[in-house]
Amino acid sequence: DTGVSQDPRHKITKRGQNVTFRCDPISEHNRLYWYRQTLGQGPEFLTYFQNEAQLEKSRLLSDRFSAERPKGSFSTLEIQRTEQGDSAMYLCASSPSFGVGYGYTFGSGTRLTVV
Amino acid sequence: AQSVTQLDSQVPVFEEAPVELRCNYSSSVSVYLFWYVQYPNQGLQLLLKYLSGSTLVKGINGFEAEFNKSQTSFHLRKPSVHISDTAEYFCAVSDPGSGNTGKLIFGQGTTLQVKP
């Protein structure tokens, strides 16, 4: 068990470009979450998967954002036509499906800078 | 809507002194409560959690927290801090309206600065 892995760790992109981030959860974890953390703020929920099904999306997740989790394993988060306001740390977390009280295992995050 | 308020954005403290980081939440219904720590350029690590039972919860690294239902608070404490405790600390609550999704609502964070 190597924990939750996120790739890349850092991404600098020009405004208007598309970016894709990858998250590899702990293998036996059914649930996968994406959060966004801007400077000086706590993480904000973006979306959640139970296996391959995307069960909830935040209003923060505009039409430019899309997330997938094919086959219930790794997940990708794509941002199209990036804007400067998208600059943030994108955190992935996974947990087993039994009980919300278990808590998450977070990855180290992908820091996105849009210039 | 559920919200979490961390009352102090920064807490400076000298090494070996006690510290308390304050957290209040808005919900009056049963919730699960968590404290996470984040070191620079890293993800969040779970310090401790309250699910039910004893209101005093002990976590890793010598931290503990006390759940107070009447005051809707979940303050984090450590009797003697170390330089290595310097980090960002986040209080979080499960969203009671989210069923069993496990979605968390986080506070804004408190920066603990331990000085030698």
Image (cartoon, rainbow, N blue to C red):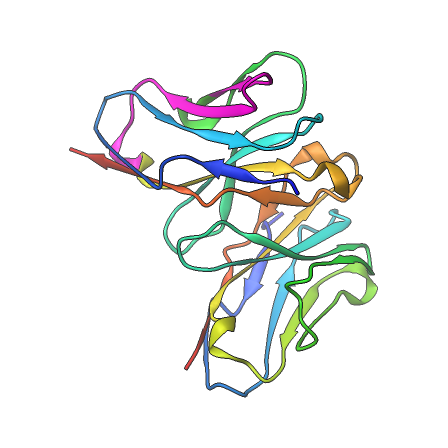
The quadrant of the rendering that contains the C terminus of chain A is bottom left
Q: Is residue B79 above or below residue A70?
A: above
Asked whether residue A111 is in view, the answer is no
Identity of the residue drawn at 83% across and 64% down: A71
Residue situated in front as seen by the camera: B2 or B107: B2
Place of residue B96 in the rendered image (x, y in percent of width and height, measured from the top left) = 73, 36
Kindly indicate the quadrant of the structure image that contains residue A5: bottom right
Magenta-highlighted residues? B65-84
Kindly indicate the quadrant of the structure image that contains residue B85: top left
Can residue A63 be found in the magenta stretch?
no
Identity of the residue drawn at 60% across and 18% down: B69
Place of residue B6 in the rendered image (x, y in percent of width and height, measured from the top left) = 44, 36
Q: Is residue A68 above or below residue A28?
A: below
Residue furthest to the top in view is: B54
Kindly indicate the quadrant of the structure image that contains residue A100: top right
**Relative to residue B2, is residue B41 drawn left or right?**
left
Place of residue A112 in the rendered image (x, y in percent of width and height, measured from the top left) = 47, 71
Identity of the residue drawn at 55% across and 17% down: B68
Asked whether residue A80 is in view, the answer is yes
**Relative to residue A67, is residue B69 drawn left or right?**
left
**How many marks overall?**
0
Identity of the residue drawn at 23% across and 22% down: B16
Residue situated in front as seen by the camera: A102 or A36: A36
Q: Is residue B37 above or below residue A23?
A: above
